[in-house]
Amino acid sequence: MTLPDYVVFENIVLVLTKRLRSAFNFLSHFFHMRPRVFCAKSARQYY
């Protein structure tokens, strides 16, 4: 395994981890916000 291949592989891993982290943060934020929206809609319907 030559040095350039290792550098390219490391860059690919870094980009993938950044994308996975951003996607995970977006999904966690989305799933944390959804129950509040559903509770607000149900509260409006009941009251």
Image: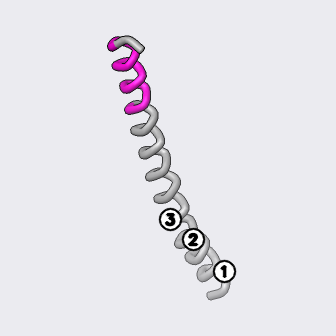
Residue depicted at x 52% and y 53%? 27
For disc 2, the marked residue is 35
For disc 3, the marked residue is 33
Q: Is residue 8 magenta?
A: yes
Label 1 sits on what residue type? Gln
Main SS, magenta residues: helix
Q: Which residue is at the front of the view, 40 or 4?
A: 4
Q: Which residue is at the front of the view, 41 or 29?
A: 29
Q: Is residue 9 magenta?
A: yes
Q: Which residue is at the front of the view, 9 or 25?
A: 9
Pick the quarter of the image with the C terminus.
bottom right
Q: Is residue 32 left or right of residue 1?
A: right
Residue depicted at x 50% and y 65%? 33
What secondary structure is found at the residue carrying circle 1?
helix
For disc 1, the marked residue is 45
User: Which stretch appears magenta?
Assistant: 3-14
